[in-house]
Amino acid sequence: MHSPTPDTTATAPASTIHLRSAGCSLLLEVRPGRLATVRHWGGDLGPLDRAAAEAACRAGRRVGQLSGELDAATVSLVPEAWTGWMGRLGLVGSRQGRGWSPAFATTAVTLDGTQVTGYAEAGPATVRVAAVDAENRLRLTLEIQLLDSGLVRMRGTLANDGDDFDLTELSLYLPVPAHATELLDFTGRWGMERLAQRQEFNIGTHLRENRRGRSGLDSAYLLHATEHGSDFAGGETWAVHVAWSGNHRHLAEHDSTGIRMLGGGELLLPGEVRLATGEEYRTPWIYASYGDGLDRVAHRFHDHLRARPGHVGPERPVTFNAWEAVYFDHDPEHLVELARLAAELGVERFVLDDGWFGARRSSRAGLGDWTVSRDVWPDGLHPLVDAVRGHGMEFGLWVEPEMVNPDSDLARAHPEWIMAARTELPVEQRSQHVLNLSIPECYEAILEQLLALLDEYPISFLKWDHNRDHVEAGVQPLGGAPGEHEQTLALYRMLERIRAAHPALEIETCSAGGGRVDLGILEHTDRVWVSDASDPLERQRLMRWTGQLLPPELLGSHIASMHSHTTSRRHDLSFRGATALFGHLGVEWDLSAATPEERSGLARWIALYRAHRGLLNTGRVWRGPDPAAELWSHGVVAQDRSEAIYAFTALAWSRPTAPPQARLRGLDPQRTYRVRPLTVGELPPGFSAPDWWDEDGIEFPATALMRIGLQMPVMHPEHTVLVHLTLV
């Protein structure tokens, strides 16, 4: 937390920096005595010389005075009150009520480590801006990156050189233009995560604060500002995402002078960050994406994630999870039989879910005691693990290390390890509480148990769950002071240590389904469990919108039984299979209760996924434009555009006319493609083949497919058909 004292506080000379990458520009201006200001974030401005860049900055400045108002403020990446800005401030804090209005002056600007004076232009690059408030003895460092993908990534570090400074908020902002007139973000609940919501970008603050100690089932996820009527295919769109798995905020600001901004940061609870002399606080990364249409915004995130060292490969193993097959009823013989059946169908990874440890015969006991239950598994997990691996599959295990049941050996031995703000424990959720991982002894006790499991058994995969919100998450016995910030950092450290000890281990982030999905947790994990709802009708929306941030290979997507355990709907295997195909495919089904015909059909869907996963897990995702509200289309196109798979889905009864055309996006307009139906088993009920439907395939110029499209087939609601395109 300690940082060096700066050598100088001399004001940096004026400078302008233009960053360009992947069709995007970021234009920054630094004026003497000010913080850095973004004059343009959006489409590529093309190569600029110094005069052109300075002219562009002038075009981006807001000046002029309305009657009775101050001049339009210069709003930096961290908006400050002293500039005349009347909106929400970027930095909020004080020393017992003093020093609450900092005024930072930039002292140095570097581009990829080289000092900048005057003008500089670069491709993907990192800009660091050092600034000082000499009067209040504060230093601020801003790091702004334009990545290869065209994503902007930024964070700030506040250092204190004076008396204790209580930090309340440090958020970073980027401007958006006046024609960004609508906002799009998300909400949800258990089983219904990532429900999209749109509204006008009105004057005032659109604030989405999250105090759940995780991303949240109702997470804002991504906050977009868009042109009116934008969709997946078009309409300029700007979006921000806070890469933090604890409390956080996303916000959009529009003031009466016309300034519009998007921003975010960590949400700090009262007294959570107090900087002593020489200490510093660093924000999480705030990501920002620009594109013409929602798809192109998403593509930048996908490209960035796929370029990471250690990103998962395209050959994602088909995964069986035993939760909906057995729940807490762990019968070793039954589970060994499920492993045999799964392997016969082509499954490549078998995951044992909740119920294998301690007194865990229900959700009311056992969390915190991470040793195999000898009552259920007298020989440990070895018989099951040996059977799984004997069938050529990997073995995976469910854990929930951040939680504890009051009915557990751990809670009885160390009640002081439970997070609480008062002498009374917080309200229970799912009969459990949150363990305080910032306590070194607690952290080491949990980590030791997990590492012991990983050392004893050849575990290739952990499903890391987190099933409750944090309520009154205070630190005992230190008076219940808030501990969310340190809890999140401790979680990251634990995941890092586990991965360092077992570098081949894959970890899935799960949180009552899709309650912890963010780019912070994705720095330490390899897959997300999108939702506890495997109902394919719900999953159509869930996969579509979760894909606004993450590519398909990171989205856990399982084929469950005909009868949905979350919604009680019933769906044909064709709909379940075609929906799950566009993610990391798995199975969530008691295979011993399935008929031989059902297992045979499931095997064909697994074989189809295995045959095409190289495309599905590396290709470019294109969603829509949908022919109608009840008819959806989407596809995955190979990076070289040599092949593609598209899905046509009837969500409800179509209108009283023949279905319209679905245009196929993302193809090479200079080429010709052969279109073949991709069928598994029988066609959907009510199916009526359109004129282009031919099992041998028909050749079409790409321009016709992209501009005219293919007529959607007639079929009953809640069914999907697939087509496979290959270059001629």
Image (cartoon, grey):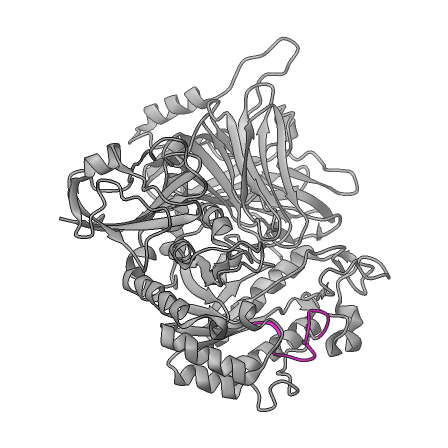
519 relative position to 672: left or right: right
Q: What stretch is highlighted in magenta?
A: 353-365
Residue 671 image-quadrant placement: top left
640 relative position to 399: left or right: left
Our reading of the magenta stretch's main secondary structure is: loop
Locate residue 265, reporting x and y percent: 59, 44
Vertical position of residue 204 compared to residue 207: above or below: above
Rendered residue at 64%/74% (across/down): 446
674 relative position to 84: left or right: left
Vertical position of residue 712 compared to residue 315: above or below: above
Rendered residue at 64%/14% (across/down): 69
Vertical position of residue 417 compared to residue 539: above or below: below
356 in the magenta segment: yes
Q: Which residue lies furthest to the right in this view?
A: 423
Q: Using the image as rendered, state which of residue 562 and residue 199 is in the foreground.
A: 562
Rendered residue at 48%/38% (across/down): 239
